[in-house]
Image (cartoon, rainbow, N blue to C red):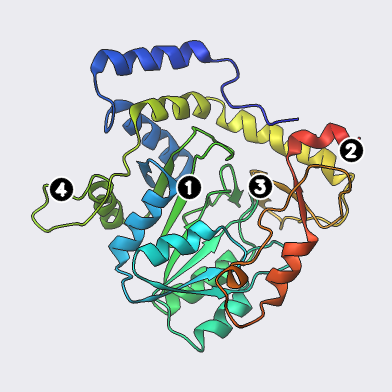
Amino acid sequence: MPAPNLFNNDFQEFEELTKRVFASGIWAKGPLVSQFEEQWSNWNNVDTVATSCWAGGAMAALDFIGVKDELILCSSNTAAATAMVCIKSGATVDFVDCNKADLCMSYESLVEVCNRQKPKAVWITHIGGHIAFQIHEIAAFCEKNDIWLLEDCAHAHGAEWNGVKPGTFGDAGVYSYFATKSVPIGEGGALVSKHTEMLNHAKKYISYGAKNPKPIYGLNFRMPEMSAAVGLVQMKHFDEHFKHKRFLAKKLDQIFINRVILPDGMLSGYYKYITFDSIEHHTSARVFDAPLHLIFNKDYCLANSEWIANNHWCLSVFDYNEFL
């Protein structure tokens, strides 16, 4: 059973928004994008720059930091995109192991790697809809050692930990609104940060960096007004949508014993429902089925990442009826 979209049949409202776009003749960098940024900032409790895709926000943040010829560490259990944007930005990438409990970056592994290498930045990925369980330890370590901490929030819509939202533990977070995500607009992304200078840089970077006294060699990562219209309609039902997903997840909790168990005070957005029980005769897949250190032909073992790749399954919470 596919997940319902967040439109909830509010097509009339979407139609009204599209009429505003046609009437204004403003197709990008317009009022709907600004309104979407404001609404996302209100939820995320931090300022936002909307982009045309996840990569746009990620590359803008990396360009601000200045990572050319620098080392960036990523969790091995993440999407290839996390490493690819680093490589495209001129950085070298190496990988850190994950924890079995949450599939996210291991603090102990990060410290061990940093004792051997000196990274400029770390990408931590919040997997499956929940926040990385060791985010506080990792954030404190990065701050103490002057390492930029970037959060890959592509799965993390709707999550929080004691009221703290993804993308606010470190220096910046990047969201995806791709078609499969919990807030899908087809293509789209957002950079959130407590650093005003980074966001100002991003606003220039995603529009080619043109017309600036000091050249910024950016690209076109502007979010179109029509994409913002899709996002605005979905934001109307944001809280309701994630409350319903958590209700359905509790039903699955009664069925699957070996699963990701959230710490006290954490809410997941349940991009995926992750279990370590083998699910036979079902179309379920894995969040990521190959660790990046193997994809990138690294000559070392990251045992937890390799174990996770072969021993977890994920469902949509909307599949719960199949298991009742």
Label 1 to label 3, Cα distance in Å? 15 Å
Q: On the rendered image, what quadrant is the C terminus found in?
A: top right
Discs 1/3, front: 1
Question: Which quadrant would residue 5 be assigned to in this image?
Answer: top right
Residue under pointer 4: 210
Mark earlier in primary sequence (4, 1): 1
The residue positioned 70% from the left and 32% from the top of the image is 244
Q: Are marks 4 and 1 in contact (CB under 8 Å)?
A: no
Mark earlier in primary sequence (1, 2): 1
The residue positioned 63% from the left and 29% from the top of the image is 240
Q: Is residue 324 above or below residue 121?
A: above
Residue under pointer 2: 323
Horizontal side of residue 213 vs 191, given as left or right? left
Which amino acid type is shown beneath numbered disc 3? Ser
Label 3 to label 2, Cα distance in Å? 21 Å
Q: Are marks 2 and 4 in contact (CB under 8 Å)?
A: no
Residue 169 percent location from the top left of the image = 49, 60
Mark earlier in primary sequence (3, 2): 3
Q: Are marks 3 and 2 in contact (CB under 8 Å)?
A: no
The residue positioned 63% from the left and 48% from the top of the image is 129
